[in-house]
Image: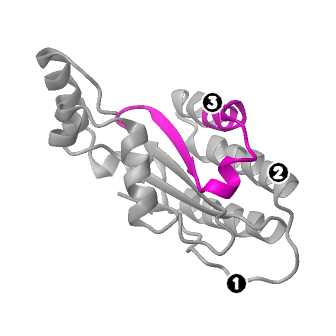
Amino acid sequence: MTQHLTFGQRCGRALKHWRTSPATARAAFPETTLKAIETAIADGEKIHRAEVRLIVEAALTPGMAYRGVTNRERARELFAHYGVWDTEDNCGVLIYINLAAHQVDIVADRHVGRRITPEQWQAICRTMTAGFASGNYHDSSLQALGELNSLLQHHFPASGERSNQLPNEAILL
């Protein structure tokens, strides 16, 4: 559902996204943080059956921002584009971070979405956004992934060896 914004709001939003560069994402998520995220995802996938992807986007294109594309819409688009929905047990989970919007969104495949409540997803998002507000991207991302892994382990415990269906490394857009 695209946001209904005034002309001034659309322009301001587009400008905010235009000013947030990929360098912002690289500064917030340096290589050491990306490797730690990859490890946390891989470790989690040893204790649960879900497949987790994390995507950090510095900003929407100014055109998308101007049109009022929401964080949720963008997350769903990336969920489809990166095939997070295409897992054996329908247990794909995408964590989408938009730095310009200061928002985190989680999109889960239908099997996971039926078991985990919106409040539980929101708690994980709040862990990240609270840390991000103080500039702590590394620890808050790892803490949120720990919370997510525990939640997924509770509902979808690992049941022996299985193949890794989605790459574990975070994506910077």
Up/down of 83 relative to 156, above or below? below
Magenta residues (range): 99-127
Up/down of 42 relative to 30, above or below? below
| Mark before the other along the chain sequence, 2 or 1 | 2
Residue plotted at (62% across, 55% down)? 110
The residue to which callout 2 is attached is 150
Q: Label 1 to label 3, Cα distance in Å?
A: 31 Å
Residue nearer the viewer, 173 or 82: 82
Residue plotted at (29% across, 26% down)? 3
The residue to which callout 3 is attached is 126
In the picture, measured across the screen, residue 116 lies left or right of residue 13, that is right
- The answer to whether marks 1 and 3 mark residues whose Cβ atoms lie closer than 8 Å is no
In the picture, measured across the screen, residue 37 lies left or right of residue 173, that is right
| Mark before the other along the chain sequence, 1 or 3 | 3
Q: Which residue type does callout 1 highlight? A: Ser
Residue plotted at (17% across, 40% down)? 62
Q: Label 2 to label 1, Cα distance in Å?
A: 20 Å
Q: Is residue 117 magenta?
A: yes
Label 2 packing within 10 angstroms: few (<14), some (14-19), many (20+): some
Figure quadrant of residue 92: bottom right
Element at label 3: helix
Query: The N terminus is located in which quarter?
Result: top left
- The answer to whether marks 2 and 1 mark residues whose Cβ atoms lie closer than 8 Å is no
Q: Which residue type does callout 3 highlight? A: Arg
Task: Give percent across and percent down for residue 95.
Answer: 55, 50
Element at label 1: loop
The residue to which callout 1 is attached is 163
